[in-house]
């Protein structure tokens, strides 16, 4: 078996990163933002020490790469995750190289790129996972260096201190970052207690704690509402739910790419059978990173509904483990390491066609009020058409005198509220307010106050889309004297009807909505 040269491997990795980055950049110019992305845009629009759903890092990333929202296009909001993903791919290559050799690093980079979670959810979309993955891998890269040595030198101490900062930044990205420290404690207690005698071990913990101060201060000021919200999401109901578990399991398979998942499982089987393809101290670090996070959230899924991307960082060490196994196999099997990336590329082409160009209606068609419901492509398409329709309708209403000039908008939930805010209200220099309870409106409970709230006696617009339709009479009738339909607009794709947008006047707000801030 021929061994690739250092220069050849580096070139392959750089080509892989370049091609994957160009694909993501192209998609960023073609696809409208998803409902999570437009919601996290509000973190940059109204920055804070922390937020109801997540810590502040995703908003900071959006601010940096959009020049504090000077560049408001979808492309620049996604630029941060795309750049961080490119760097993360190089970092996992470095990790694989340290674990075994450069070929392992190359294989790890391919498996990372072929992962739907790594390439799209965290590598393209504006989500908290983008900075989480970036800081997680940087921290993991250091753990490989400083955890195994029994003889601790100044080099390991410095790396541990830097780990403390990176772990803190990972936790400022998403709460799962705490599992980095859990992995360190497990490894230190089981395999290298010399670290417990080192002042740098404890200083690293202090550095992480200092990094978390903004999050803690915000939660103290807001009665720990973020912790309460997330605790409620994962507290077991103690009713065994096979459907939740299967959803979690198959979600993990899908998010990691089914082909990659099979390659990982084969490597795990070989590892369990004690095939010596990885140095024991390194395998212990990888297992300490994998097992706690995976076990915790997979076990939760036996009793509660979970989301598969909660366990996603647990698969990074498995990607490296699989790369170390497959690099020892015949050269012709390298095709199977590359294939997940090709498979994902095909999926992305199909998704782009479905979302932007397909004449197919994948959702319900039974009636006008639910036309397009359950069609996942509607989330990332058609909002620019809604904006153009609103601009015309609001101008017409103002000229007729049926609505005041520059009247603001209301909605009822963070989705589709954030879409309407980003694509409709902001371009037309209007404010959007959400009326609902905390579990429905999330950060908009604060945004309502930042925007000085609704004014008694004022009229507002309401927009409903048929794939997420809510009758305004059922949600707003206690707050407005009259609710009047204005217009109905067809949203089309490739000349075919995809959904309807309904426009309403909400007349004479009575001032009775109570904003649900703690």
Image: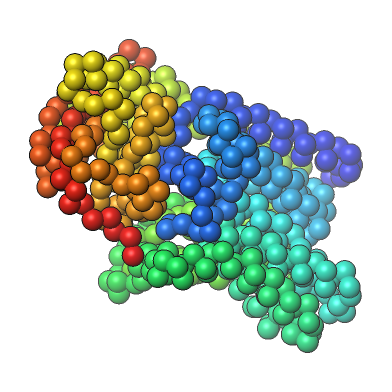
Residue furthest top in the image = 495
Residue 328 visible here: no
Q: Residue 496 in the image: x percent, y percent? A: 30, 16
Give whichever of 186, 202 is nearer the camera: 202
| Left/right of residue 463 with respect to residue 382 in the rendered view | left
Q: Quadrant of residue 100?
A: bottom right
Q: Is residue 408 above or below residue 250?
A: above
Q: Is residue 295 above or below residue 190?
A: above
Q: Quadrant of the C terminus?
A: bottom left
Q: Is residue 382 above or below residue 17?
A: above
Give whichever of 354, 62 is nearer the camera: 62
Residue at the image point whose x is 76% and y is 65% from the top: 162
Give whichever of 19, 62 is nearer the camera: 62
Q: Quadrant of residue 183?
A: bottom right
Q: Residue 311 in the image: x percent, y percent? A: 51, 59
How is the structure coloured here? rainbow
Residue at the image point whose x is 65% and y is 70% from the top: 210
Residue at the image point whose x is 25% and y is 48% from the top: 435
| Left/right of residue 52 with respect to residue 360 in the rendered view | right
Residue 396 visible here: yes
Q: Quadrant of the N terminus?
A: top right
Q: Residue 229 in the image: x percent, y percent? A: 37, 64
Residue at the image point whose x is 29% and y is 35% from the top: 409
Number of marks in the rendered image: 0
Q: Quadrant of residue 77?
A: top right
Residue furthest bottom in the image = 197
Q: Residue 2 in the image: x percent, y percent? A: 86, 42
């Amino acid at each position: 078996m021929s061994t690739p040269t250092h220069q050849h491997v580096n070139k392959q990795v750089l080509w892989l990163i370049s091609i994957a980055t160009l694909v993501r950049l192209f998609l960023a110019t073609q696809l409208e933002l998803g409902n999570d992305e437009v919601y996290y845009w509000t973190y940059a629009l109204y920055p804070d020490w922390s937020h109801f759903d997540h810590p502040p890092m995703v908003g900071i990333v959006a601010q940096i790469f959009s020049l504090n929202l000077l560049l408001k296009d979808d492309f620049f909001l996604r630029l941060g995750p795309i750049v961080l993903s490119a760097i993360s791919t190089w970092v996992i290559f470095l990790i694989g190289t340290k674990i075994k050799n450069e070929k392992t690093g190359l294989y790890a980079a391919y498996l990372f790129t072929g992962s739907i979670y790594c390439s799209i959810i965290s590598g393209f979309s504006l989500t908290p996972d983008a900075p989480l993955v970036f800081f997680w891998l940087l921290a993991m890269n250091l753990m490989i260096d400083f955890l195994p040595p029994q003889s601790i030198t100044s080099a390991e101490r410095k790396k541990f201190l830097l780990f403390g900062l990176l772990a803190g930044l990972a936790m400022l990205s998403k709460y799962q970052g705490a599992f980095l420290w859990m992995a360190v404690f497990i490894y230190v207690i089981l395999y290298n207690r010399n670290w417990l005698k080192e002042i740098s071990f404890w200083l690293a913990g202090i550095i992480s704690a200092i990094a978390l101060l903004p999050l803690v201060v915000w939660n103290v000021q807001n009665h720990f509402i973020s912790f309460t919200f997330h605790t409620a999401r994962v507290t077991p109901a103690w009713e065994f739910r096979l459907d939740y578990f299967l959803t979690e399991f198959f979600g993990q398979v899908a998010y990691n790419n089914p082909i990659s998942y099979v390659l990982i499982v084969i490597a795990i089987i070989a590892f369990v059978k004690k095939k010596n393809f990885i140095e024991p101290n390194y395998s212990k670090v990888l297992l300490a990173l994998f097992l706690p996070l995976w076990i915790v959230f997979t076990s939760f899924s036996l009793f509660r509904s979970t989301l598969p991307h909660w366990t996603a960082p647990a698969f990074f060490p498995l990607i490296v483990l699989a790369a170390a196994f497959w690099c020892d196999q015949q050269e012709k099997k390298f095709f199977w390491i590359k294939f997940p990336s090709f498979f994902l590329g095909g999926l992305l082409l199909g998704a782009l066609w479905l979302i932007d160009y397909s004449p197919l209606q994948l959702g319900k068609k039974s009636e006008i009020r639910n036309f397009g419901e359950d069609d996942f492509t509607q989330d990332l398409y058609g909002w620019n058409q809604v904006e153009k329709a609103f601009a015309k309708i609001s101008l017409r209403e103002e000229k007729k005198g049926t609505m005041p000039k520059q009247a603001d908008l209301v909605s009822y939930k963070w989705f589709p509220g954030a879409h309407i805010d980003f694509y409709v209200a902001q371009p037309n220099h209007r404010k959007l307010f959400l009326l609902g309870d905390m579990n429905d409106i999330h950060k908009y409970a604060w945004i309502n106050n930042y925007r000085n709230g609704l004014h008694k006696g004022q009229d507002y617009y309401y927009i409903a889309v048929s794939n997420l339709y809510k009758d305004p009479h059922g949600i707003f009738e206690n707050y407005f004297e009259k609710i009047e339909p204005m217009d109905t607009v067809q949203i089309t794709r490739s000349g075919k009807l995809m959904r309807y947008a309904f426009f309403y006047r909400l007349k004479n707000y009575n001032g009775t909505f109570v904003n649900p801030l703690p």
